[in-house]
Image (tube, helix red, strand yellow):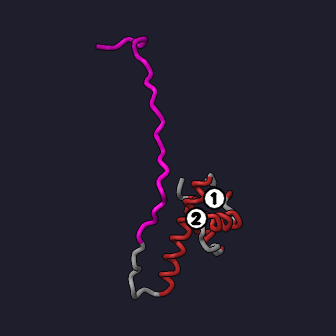
Amino acid sequence: MPVPAAALTTKRVSQPVLIDLPYTPLAKKVLPAGRPREWYVNHNRRLKAMRLAIALLDSGVFLPNQATNSRIRSMAEEVGIHPPSDITCHMVRALMRYSR
């Protein structure tokens, strides 16, 4: 049986409660042995780029052209990461480009 439109009421949805939990980093795993050194360098560079891209997105930098090398390096300083190279900065922008 249809309900008349006047009888329908809008229901207020309460905002979700955000709980500020302490940050607990994931347990580090041992990297596989026997790979060429370049593999380890690229692996660590990708991890650093991912951390920086997430930090920039969380801080409100959503477009890759907003993420200049100096902005990425200042974010690295805020987060407590060693300053990234130009290659890592390029990777950060590439990750941001594909995060849309």
What x and y, as percent, mark residue 95?
55, 62
Q: Is residue 19 magenta?
A: yes
What residue do we see at 43% from left, 66% from top?
Answer: 26
Q: CA distance from mark 2 to mark 1?
A: 12 Å
Residue found farthest to the right = 70
Question: Relative to residue 99, is residue 5 depicted above or below?
Answer: above
Q: Residue at x 60, y 68 (%)?
A: 80
Region of the chain picked out in magenta, as a range? 1-27
* Nearer to the camera, 83 or 97: 83
In the picture of the structure, the residue carrying the numbered disc 1 is: 64
Q: Looking at the picture, does residue 7 appear above or below residue 76?
A: above
Left or right, 26 with respect to 51, comes to left
Helix, strand or loop for the magenta stretch, by majority: loop
Q: Quadrant of the N terminus?
A: top left
Q: Amino acid at mark 1?
A: Pro
Labelled disc at residue 72 = none
Where in the figure is residue 30, as x and y percent of width and height? Answer: 40, 79
Q: Position of residue 20 (x, y in %)?
A: 49, 50
Q: Secondary structure at mark 2?
A: helix
The tally of labels here is 2
Near mark 1 (Cα within 10 A), the count class, few <14, some 14-19 or many ≥20, is: some
In the rendered structure, are the residues bearing label 2 and label 1 in contact, judged by CB atoms less than 8 Å apart?
A: no
Q: Quadrant of residue 83?
A: bottom right
Residue 37: give x, y in percent of width and height. 49, 87
The residue beneath circle 2 is: 52
Point out the tag, 2 or 1, that comes first from the N-terminus: 2
Q: Residue 61 colored magenta? A: no
Local SS, label 1: helix
